[in-house]
Amino acid sequence: GPRDDRDPVGEVLHHGVNLAAGTAAVGRSARLYGGAMTPVGDPGPFSAHLGFRVLRADAEGAVVEADPQPEHVNGGGILHGGYLSALLDSATGWAVHGAGPEGMVAPHVTLTTQFVRAGTAGEPLQATATCTSLGRRICTTQGEITQGGRVIARATGTHAVILGG
């Protein structure tokens, strides 16, 4: 399966690709990550499968909505943490995409999620996220999910920066 590692000089590797090596890694990473980012509004195949809708992704941040269904709950009848984490992953990824230069790919290195309260199926979710710093190699993000005007989950993340040549 996927494996994150470090090479001998401490560079972050993902699937054996040096994510911070610049242009040499871009061709491999484009193949690895399916090429350029999808257009704003197209959430990509996985997020589309979960029903996510990208409403906005620009320098100010991103807004992604979802309508959780009964199949998105856990055995306790509340929204599954993986579903909420996937929504935060998408929102923070789109925040980076909106803030970064054209052609940048920025896969997550970390995503730390805090579940604040239980979410329920049948009521819309709105995830908002911002890119809090954008560096040459790493950028950081923060996001939150609300349901019915109340925060149900928050996350912070770091992303590797890969620029096209």
Image: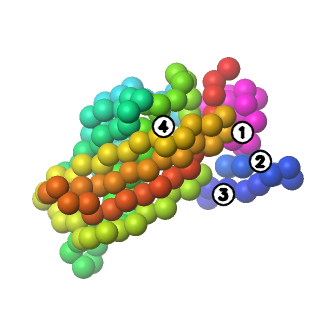
Residue 25's image quarter?
top right
Query: What label does residue 3 carry, if any?
Result: 3
First in sequence: mark 2 or mark 1?
2
Q: Which residue is mark 4?
A: 96
Q: Which residue is mark 1?
A: 20
Residue 92 inside the magenta-drawn segment:
no
Q: Position of residue 49 (x, y in %)?
A: 32, 47
* Label 2 to label 4: alpha-carbon separation: 21 Å
Considering the image in quadrants, where does the C terminus appear?
top right
Dot in front, 4 or 3: 4
Closer to the camera in the image, 81 or 57 = 57
Q: Looking at the image, do the residues carrying marks 2 and 1 touch, with CB atoms under 8 Å apart?
A: yes
Q: Position of residue 161 (x, y in %)?
A: 62, 37
The residue range painted magenta reads: 17-33
Label 1 residue SS: loop
Q: Which residue is mark 2?
A: 11
* Label 2 to label 3: alpha-carbon separation: 14 Å
Q: Position of residue 164 (x, y in %)?
A: 63, 24
Dot 4 amino acid type: Val
Label 4 residue SS: helix
* Label 4 to label 3: alpha-carbon separation: 23 Å
| Residue placed furthest toward the bottom | 76
At x 73%, y 56%, the residue is 5
* Label 2 to label 1: alpha-carbon separation: 7 Å
Dot 2 amino acid type: Glu
First in sequence: mark 2 or mark 4?
2
* Residue 37 can be seen in this image: yes
First in sequence: mark 3 or mark 1?
3
First in sequence: mark 1 or mark 4?
1
At x 62%, y 37%, the residue is 135
